[in-house]
Every structure is written in structure tokens, then in C-alpha cells.
Amino acid sequence: MWKCNRIKYLFSPLMVKLLSNLKTISIDSCDAIEEVVSNRDDKHEEEMTTSTTTFFPHLHSLSFYFLKNLKRIGGASAAKSTTSIIHDQFKSSHVTVVPWSLCQYSREIFIYQCDSLMEVFETQEINNSSDGDITSTTIPRRESIYVPRLFNLKKLIITLCDLLQHVFTFSTLESLEQLEKLMVKNCKAMKVIVKEENGEQINKVVKFPRLKSLEL
């Protein structure tokens, strides 16, 4: 998709189910794009909450270029905090729901000049409440935080994203066993590559066992 300046998001979650063979997503110079997947216009969210569909299982490549208003890449939408988007198995008393990440199967991710992007791999906060609803919480317990898994990721290149302060959290490290190339370039606010969560000291060693190229 190129120069579609009125489109605010590319897919709805209900539409995503029909695109299981999709291998590449590339969005370039679309000024209004805020999210890649959004449930802001879905009127039938209840249809999603009983599904265990695997979204984009064959997606290999994600590319985002010159998207000045892009705020969110994957999974759950900020527009509606009461329902998380489904993937594998997060169990409540009534439904099976799990948040998911658009990046979870990707092998290559390229991000260039996305001025509003503050987080690449969104950590989604969810709470399993007693009435079966999945709700967003301001200060979640550690067990209510969903962390994206990036088992297939081999190449990540981020350039000119001036609001980004970190790339990964410590919780994502265990899934980054395949990462071979990491480039972070001209990101003015960048403070660390790997961020600790909730200000707590986590006793984990930062290691990328297959990394061949690192450029900062």
C-alpha cells in the first residue's frame, strides 16, 4: 500500500482471519495510518472472542516507511480497551482469548521514519476478571502482561523513529534465538536496546546467540 493518505488502519481483526496465506505487508507514505490492525470499527467483537484462529501464520516480511502518524503495529487496539484480540490460549471463565502480535511470525521487519511510534513490540496489559471480561488495567499484576514472542525474527532494521526509547523488553529476549541482524539508526530518543519492565531489576543476561551483525 502506497500513498493512501486517508486510510487510518489496514485490517480489522475479523478481516484478518481470511488472510491466512499473506506473506508480506508493506505500507509506504500513508500519512493517516495510525495502526496496522484495529478493532475500532468492528460492531461484532463477540464473534472474535470465541475463536482460536492463528493470525498471519505465514507472514514473513513487515515494512513500514514514512508513516508519520503510525502509533501501533500489532495486535490489540488502543481504541477499545475492553476486549483483547484473540490468538492461542488465554482462559477466562467464559471465553478463550489471547492478545497477539502482528510481528510474531515475521522473519524480517523494516521500520523507516515512523515519527509517532513509541514502541515496536507492544506489551499488552490484560486482566482476567471474575465476570469473564478481559479488561485493560492501569497497573497490572506481572501475570497479566502479555509479551510478544518473536521466534522467527532474523532481521530487524529501525531508522529515523525519534520517539523510540527502547527496542525490546527483557521478557522478549527468550524468543529472540534466531535474530541475526539488528540495526538501529538515527533514533534520537533511544536510551537502551533492552528495557527492564516496571522498573524492577531482572536477573537476565542480554544475549542474542545467532547475531551476526549489530549496527547502532
Image: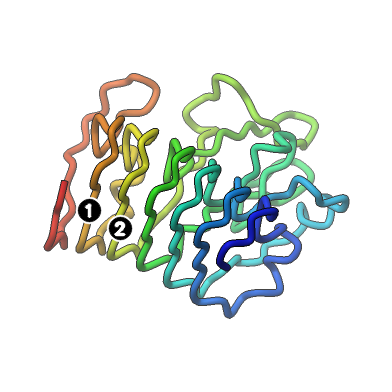
Does residue 130 appear left or right of residue 75 in this picture? right
With respect to residue 23, does 53 lie above or below? Answer: above
What amino acid type is highlighted by mark number 2? Leu
Does residue 2 show up?
A: yes
Q: Secondary structure at mark 1?
A: strand
Residue designated by label 1: 183
Q: Give the distance between the C-alpha atoms of the residues marked 1 and 2, in whole angstroms.
A: 6 Å
Can residue 86 be seen by looking at this rendering? Answer: no
Residue occupying the point 25% across, 60% down: 179
Residue tagged 2: 156
Asked if residue 128 is positioned above or below residue 173 in the image, the reply reads above
Q: Amino acid at mark 1?
A: Met
Mark 1: few/some/many CA within 10 Å (<14, 14-19, 20+): some
User: Which of the marked residues, 1 or 2, is nearer the chain's N terminus?
Assistant: 2
How many residues crowd mark 2 within 10 Å: few (<14), some (14–19), many (20+)?
Answer: some
- Say which element carries label 2: strand
